[in-house]
Image (cartoon, grey):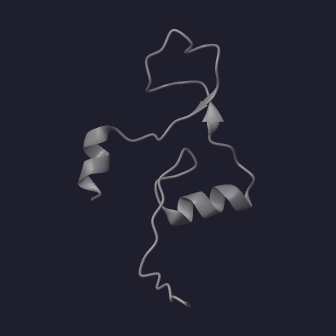
């Protein structure tokens, strides 16, 4: 059985950017979203590089 798929929109929030165009630009420019923790609180803050979404929960909720 063949099914059709319709894409009606696209969205993305990552450590590279807060929308599709920011993410696409970062990928084209070969920028990384990996670095030192700045928002998360961890005993490993200075030891492990991470990819953080640079928005707080309240900011993410407003984007819904």
Looking at the image, residue 57 sits to the left or right of residue 23; the answer is left
Q: Nearer the viewer, residue 3 or 54?
A: 3
Across and down, in percent, residue 61 comes to 26, 49
Across and down, in percent, residue 25 comes to 64, 61
Looking at the image, residue 53 sits to the left or right of residue 58; the answer is right
Report which quarter residue 27 is drawn in. bottom right
Looking at the image, residue 21 sits to the left or right of residue 35; the answer is left
Q: In this view, which residue lies farthest toward the right?
A: 30
Residue at x 65%, y 55% (from the top left corner): 26
Q: In this view, which residue lies farthest toward the front?
A: 1
Residue at x 51%, y 88% (from the top left corner): 3
Across and down, in percent, residue 31 comes to 70, 48
Residue at x 29%, y 57% (from the top left corner): 63
- Picture quarter with the C terminus: bottom left
Residue at x 33%, y 38% (from the top left corner): 56
- Picture quarter with the N terminus: bottom right
In this rendering, is residue 55 above or below 40? below
In this rendering, is residue 33 above or below 24? above
Q: Nearer the viewer, residue 54 or 50?
A: 50
Across and down, in percent, residue 43 comes to 51, 8
Count the labels in the image: 0
């Amino acid at each position: 059985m063949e099914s059709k798929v319709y894409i009606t929109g696209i969205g993305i929030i990552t450590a590279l950017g807060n929308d599709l165009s920011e993410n696409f630009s970062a990928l084209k420019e070969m920028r990384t979203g990996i670095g030192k923790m700045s928002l998360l609180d961890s005993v490993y803050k200075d030891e492990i590089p991470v990819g953080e979404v640079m928005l707080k929960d309240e900011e993410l909720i407003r984007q819904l």
